[in-house]
Amino acid sequence: YVKDKTNRFYIKRILEKYTECIYLDPEDPELRAKILSTRALINSGLKNYGRVIEDCKEAIKGFPSFVKPYFRKCEAQLA
């Protein structure tokens, strides 16, 4: 998926920004779940499946009615 080293650099920077976003508004469980789910998607592209599962578990725990983390977690577990 991410073969070009330049792209990998930028993707890692994007991951850092999503991590920063998580700490900006930790009181809003829906926003936190969406940020975690998007970060999981990015990690999935990097084949960091353990991190995908961790982020999805946390997103599900915080906002159980949000469907995307369930799907992404399943994909990571299958990979």
Image (spheres, grey):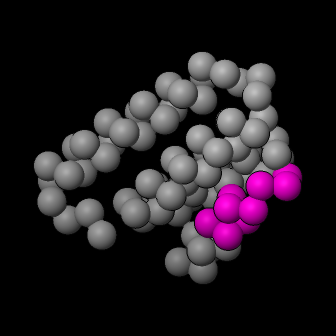
Q: Is residue 54 left or right of residue 52?
A: right
User: Does the rendering let one see residue 51?
Assistant: no
Give the percent coordinates (x, y) of residue 34: 64, 45
Q: Is residue 1 left or right of residue 64?
A: left
Q: Residue at x 76, y 28 (%)?
A: 28
Give the percent coordinates (x, y) of residue 50: 56, 58
Q: Quadrant of residue 74?
A: bottom right
Q: In terms of secondary structure, what is the magenta stretch mainly?
A: helix
Depicted 66 relative to depicted 9: above or below? below
Give the percent coordinates (x, y) of residue 15: 42, 40
User: Does the rendering let one see residue 53?
Assistant: yes
Does the magenta portion include 59? no
**Start-end of magenta stretch:** 64-73
Q: Residue at x 54, y 27 (%)?
A: 21
Give the percent coordinates (x, y) of residue 4: 15, 60
Q: Residue at x 20, y 52 (%)?
A: 7
